[in-house]
Image: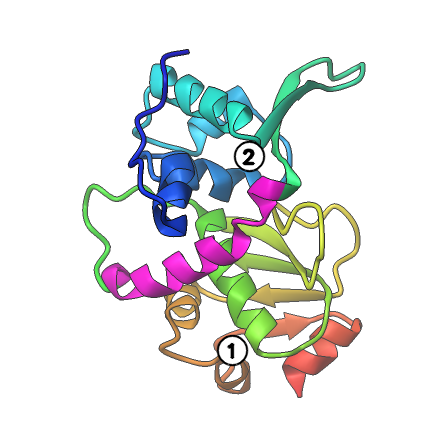
Amino acid sequence: MPPRRRYDQYCSAARALDLVGDRWTLLIVRELLAGPRRYTDLHADLPGVSTDVLASRLKDMERDGLAARRKLPPPGAAYVYELTPRGRDLLPVLHALGEWGSPELAELRPTDAVRAHWSALPLLAVLSAADVGAGLAEVGTEEGEFHLYVGAEDGPVYGHGPAPVAADARLVMDAATCAEVCRGQVGIADAVRAGRVTVTGDGALAKALRE
């Protein structure tokens, strides 16, 4: 691999940008925070990235200790990429970057791609800040479903589609409400009280959200 371009500055921000400052790298981290992903799945959920660039970024992330590639056991036998603990440590960076960038989501551009699970990290931050406890939350909008591991200390922090096991809480809302909650324009508790978010389930997480 060719040597990576560096800032060559003795500064922690510069050193961090040496590792994650290239275009697409942090968005790959966003996708891998859902757990191990196949190359084809990553490419499908990163519209606009070329196959060459994606392959290059993944190799860089492996080299820098942010991600690892491994082969699933049979019958899967496919190769997947997953974050290392060092890569997972970027979760608060994604949270902070998402909060800083949320004002830019006031308008949906005609060329914007949309994936339901792109709301997962902002909504996870909202639920964590609301101090509703830990648990598995399933979220449904007209754009699709995803699930959140609220309070998870390791492993995936969200996943695509319905929860793999019975969720502690299920939240149903329209996409507009989800966007407003994620941007902080309306609090999750206020949205639940107003009936804009329907919460079902018998777990402690569901009860805390309905209080």
Secondary structure type for disc 2: loop
Which residue is found at the position 60% from the left and 42% from the top?
86
Give the main secondary structure of the magenta stretch.
Answer: helix
User: Residue tagged by mark 2?
Assistant: 66
| Quarter of the figure that contains the N terminus | top left
- The C terminus lies in which quarter of the figure? bottom right
Pick the residue in front: 12 or 209.
Answer: 12
Magenta-span inclusion, residue 91: yes
The number of numbered badges drawn on the structure is 2
Of labels 1 and 2, the one closer to you: 2
Q: Type of residue at label 2?
A: Leu
Q: Position of residue 123 (x, y in %)?
A: 51, 64
Q: Which residue is mark 1?
A: 188
The residue that appears at 43% across and 18% down in the rendered structure is 55
Please name the residue shown 36% across and 49% down the image: 11
Label at residue 33: none
Depicted 45 relative to depicted 99: above or below: above
Percent across and percent down for residue 115 are 42, 44
Q: Magenta segment, which residues? A: 86-105
* Label 1 CA crowd tier, 10 Å (few <14, some 14–19, many 20+): many
User: Is residue 201 something one can see in this rendering?
Assistant: yes
